[in-house]
Amino acid sequence: MNDPTTLSCTLTADRSTDQISGWDHVLSRALEVQRTPRGASVLLPADLTGAVTKLAAAESVCCSFLSMSTRSTTDGLLLEVTSAHDEAIPLILGMVGLDQAEEPAGPVRSAETGKSP
């Protein structure tokens, strides 16, 4: 499961730009971001549910090496991005703005300050 050739995206250049822009917008509103053993979790405002659902569905088609799930919490919408492929972990961490050196389940980074509490 750790074959780097399995990490490929099937989006065209123009669709890729739209997808990245969408994720940038959504992730800019993150309330909390935390590394997990196989990726990251992001707490988002609940009003982003529609946008996140649409982006995650598109991502599951173009980047089959990623797994994305969402669930409502009392604090908002929790997005979990994971992969069974070790090589994908740095991609996930970069996507959500976490330092690759951060330990899994480490301190939560506040989106407001960019620092751990």
Image: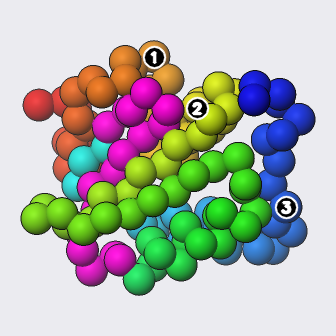
Q: Rounded to the nearest whole Å, what is the CA distance between mark 2 and mark 1?
A: 11 Å
Q: Quadrant of residue 3?
A: top right
Specify whether residue 41 is painted magenta: yes
Viewer-closest of 70 and 76: 70
Q: Which mark is residue 101?
A: 1
Residue drawn where x is 59% and y is 30% of the image: 90
> Which residue is label 3 attached to?
10
How busy is the neighbourhood of tag 2: few (under 14 within 10 Å), some, or many (20 plus)?
A: many
Q: Which mark is residue 89?
A: 2
Specify whether residue 71 is painted magenta: no
The quarter in which the N terminus is drawn is top right
Residue range corresponding to the magenta coloring = 34-49
Q: x, y (%) of residue 27?
A: 41, 59
Q: Which mark is residue 28?
A: none
Residue drawn where x is 82% and y is 30% of the image: 4
Viewer-closest of 1 and 16: 1
Element at badge 3? loop
18 relative to 110, above or below: below
Q: Rounded to the nearest whole Å, what is the CA distance between mark 2 and mark 3?
A: 19 Å
Element at badge 2? helix
Residue 5 visible at all: yes
